[in-house]
Image: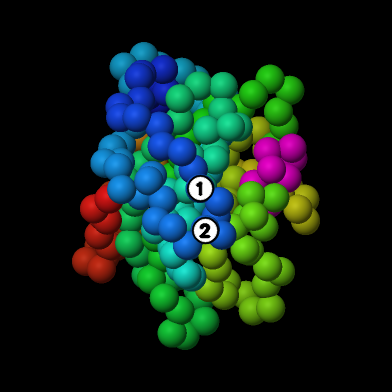
Amino acid sequence: MKSKVQSPKSKVEGRRSKVQSPTSSVKSTTEARKFKVRSAKSKIHTNELAIIALGANLEESKGNVLKAIERLREFSDAPLLISSLWNMAPVDCPPGSPMFVNAIVGLVPRQAETPESLLAKLKRLEKEFGRTPKKTLNEPRTLDLDLIAFGNERRHSPELILPHPRAHQRRFVLAPLSEIAAGFVLPGQKRTVAELLAQLPKDNSVRKILV
């Protein structure tokens, strides 16, 4: 049976802010506004939703994540589902790596969008925010955009694996995702996001960020 998640059909609270260039040194108006979890009353099937994980731990991490969320609106056919921002410790990163700012966005892909075409857009967006080819595995980054799931699509290529192979084990994915789609079942999993999160070891270092 297809699991159901909250729909992004509800009205987004608050005014949309004008997004400044990622390279601007001026504080984004997006960062200043009250950012609330977006969810909705009606239901959609999981095969209508793409899940994107955002993370940054270099330069203006919080500002970059907030600006990137605004840009992701361009890729969706409906209002975004948006989690809180979370501060989390690096996982499998070089020693001394800064803490991450993480979030999750759920969007409804536009007509004719494919996992590959959406991934290409995410990669271009990363570059706009100063992301450069990595020299070290999991090194600090200005912006990281991971395509976690694209409906029920499956992929296994050097460029893209869907669903993300470690999403069901990662608190930085499951904690924010549980805010917007606790009942979501990742393709290939039998447990909901909320159930997967409850199975993880407790981590007292994780905290939400006030925006």
Q: Is residue 127 magenta?
A: no
Q: Is residue 131 above or below residue 84?
A: below
Q: Are marks 2 and 1 in contact (CB under 8 Å)?
A: yes
**Residue found at the far bottom of this picture:** 95
**Residue found at the far right of this picture:** 158
State the scheme by which the image is colored: rainbow
Which residue position holds label 2?
24
The reply to whether residue 46 is in sight is: yes
Q: In this view, does 36 lie above or below 207?
A: above
Label 1 is placed on what type of residue?
Gln
The reply to whether residue 167 is in sight is: no
Label 2 is placed on what type of residue?
Ser
Residue drawn at point x = 59 percent, y = 45 percent: 147
Q: Does the magenta stretch include residue 119?
A: yes
Q: In this view, does 45 lie above or below 157?
A: above
Q: Out of 9 and 15, give the one closest to the viewer.
A: 15
Q: What stretch is highlighted in magenta?
A: 116-123
Residue 197 x %, y %: 33, 49
Helix, strand or loop at mark 1 = loop
| Image mark for residue 20 | 1
Q: Out of 191 and 49, give the one closest to the viewer.
A: 49
Residue 169 x %, y %: 44, 56
Residue drawn at point x = 64 percent, y = 55 percent: 128
Residue drawn at point x = 41 percent, y = 50 percent: 28
| Image mark for residue 58 | none
Q: Out of 146 and 12, give the one closest to the viewer.
A: 12
Residue 115 x %, y %: 69, 37
Helix, strand or loop at mark 2 = loop
Q: Out of 126 and 149, give the one closest to the viewer.
A: 126
Residue drawn at point x = 26 percent, y = 41 percent: 34
Residue 58 x %, y %: 48, 70
